Image: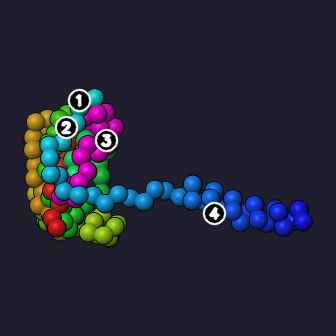
């Protein structure tokens, strides 16, 4: 009898426990249809550590921070608009990605760019990278903070 009671409790308790451990389903993103305000404290935190500010189906805005180079990136459906708020970097655009591998749908990562254009980015600069164009923070000599606005193509 105790055995049956234990089995009954397990049959009820295990699914309840497992469902409480499962991550919540992702909410579908919708386009921006009204003004979005982000206060200065959240913006400062995002620029200091990196993090999202606005997440919608048609636009993503984030604060970013890095202190070392990154990988070559290509976004098939996202145009990047970068605004440098602090620091300097060598940024390469265009050319051909070397060693490109799909990291997730419509996103590619690589190891190098051949034939690209090199830009020296400094505080106050803006650079726009169209969807499908390789780009790369090749050199980051010190802390770099910047906004990224991703305009998403349907």
Q: Residues within 10 Å of mark 2 (few under 14, many from 20)?
A: few
Nearest to viewer (mark 2 / mark 4): 4
Nearest to viewer (mark 2 / mark 3): 2
> Could you tell me how far apart the alpha carbons at marks 2 and 3 are, in whole angstroms?
18 Å
**Which residue was labeled with disc 3?**
50
Nearest to viewer (mark 4 / mark 3): 4
The magenta stretch is 42-59
- Residue 14 in sight in this render: yes
Of pointers 4 and 1, the one earlier in the residue sequence: 4
Of pointers 4 and 3, the one earlier in the residue sequence: 4
Q: Tell whether position 45 is magenta.
A: yes
Q: Residue at x 19, y 37 (%)?
A: 37
**Which residue was labeled with disc 2?**
37
Q: Residues within 10 Å of mark 3 (few under 14, many from 20)?
A: some
> Could you tell me how far apart the alpha carbons at marks 3 and 1 are, in whole angstroms?
14 Å
Helix, strand or loop at mark 4: helix
Q: Residues within 10 Å of mark 4 (few under 14, many from 20)?
A: few
Q: Residues within 10 Å of mark 1 (few under 14, many from 20)?
A: few
**Which residue was labeled with disc 1?**
40
Q: Position of residue 141 (x, y in %)?
A: 26, 39
Of pointers 2 and 4, the one earlier in the residue sequence: 4
Helix, strand or loop at mark 3: loop
Q: Considering depth in this image, is 131 or 40 the residue closer to the camera? A: 40
Tag 2 and tag 4, C-beta contact below 8 Å: no
Q: Residue at x 10, y 53 (%)?
A: 128
Name above or below for residue 89 compared with residue 73: above
Name above or below for residue 10 compared with residue 51: below
Nearest to viewer (mark 3 / mark 1): 1
Q: Residue at x 22, y 36 (%)?
A: 38
> Could you tell me how far apart the alpha carbons at marks 1 and 2 are, in whole angstroms?
10 Å
**Which residue was labeled with disc 4?**
15
């Amino acid at each position: 009898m105790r055995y049956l009671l234990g089995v009954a409790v397990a049959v009820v308790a295990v699914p309840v426990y497992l469902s409480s451990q499962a991550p919540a389903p992702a909410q579908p993103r919708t386009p921006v249809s009204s003004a979005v305000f982000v206060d200065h404290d959240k913006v400062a935190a995002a620029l200091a550590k990196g993090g999202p500010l606005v997440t919608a189906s048609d636009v993503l805005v984030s604060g970013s921070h890095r202190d070392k180079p990154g990988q070559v990136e290509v976004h098939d459906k996202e145009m990047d608009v970068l605004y440098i708020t602090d620091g300097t970097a060598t940024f390469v655009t265009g050319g051909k990605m070397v060693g490109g591998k799909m990291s997730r749908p419509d996103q590619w990562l690589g190891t190098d760019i051949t034939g690209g254009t090199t830009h020296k980015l400094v505080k106050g600069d803006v650079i726009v990278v169209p969807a499908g164009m390789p780009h790369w923070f090749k050199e980051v000599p010190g802390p770099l903070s910047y906004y990224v606005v991703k305009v998403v193509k349907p």
